[in-house]
Amino acid sequence: MDQRIESFLTDVLALAGEEPDAVGEGVRFAPADCEAIFRAREDNKRMKDQAARICRVLCRTRAAAEMHQISRECRRVGCKGLCFIIAPDH
């Protein structure tokens, strides 16, 4: 996976244990920071918006994959309550 996306995920995971408001704010701003990097790296001015959209998709996909992995690990070790909090749909 792209290092920029992994950096986004690291920033989001670093919010664990923070106050809920701080987590919500951090999760909202982390993709924006990543998008800014994608936009800056795109040389073609017409493609900057497309780069930002791709970034959002990659961030969402990577976060979902990580949540799925955490959920699977929770089920494996038997912490069902935590699974419900992290990934209630699984």
Image (cartoon, rainbow, N blue to C red):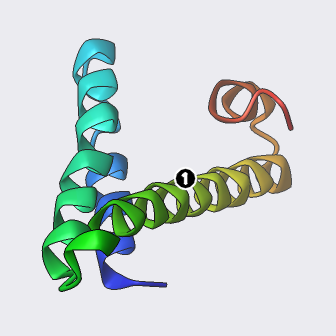
Tell me the quarter of the picture where residue 87 sits. top right
Residue at x 73% of width, y 35% of height? 83
Q: Is residue 32 left or right of residue 6?
A: left
At numbered mark 1, what does the secondary structure look like: helix, strand or loop?
helix
State the count of labels.
1
Residue ranking furthest to the front: 46
In the depicted structure, whether residue 30 falls above or below residue 65: above
Which residue is denoted by mark 1 in the rendering? 60
Tell me the quarter of the picture where residue 61 sits. bottom right
The quarter of the rendered structure image containing the C terminus is: top right
Residue 14 seen by the camera = no
Quick one: 19 or 65, which is closer to the camera? 65
Q: Position of residue 26 (x, y in %)?
A: 24, 34
In the depicted structure, whether residue 41 falls above or below residue 26: below
Tell me the quarter of the picture where residue 21 sits. top left
Q: Position of residue 53 (x, y in %)?
A: 45, 58
Residue at x 18% of width, y 81% of height? 41
Q: Position of residue 25 (x, y in %)?
A: 25, 25
In the depicted structure, whether residue 74 falls above or below residue 52: above
- Please name the amino acid that badge 1 sits on: Arg
Residue at x 25% of width, y 47% of height? 32
Q: Position of residue 66 (x, y in %)?
A: 59, 59
Residue 75 seen by the camera = yes
Q: Is residue 65 left or right of residue 3?
A: right
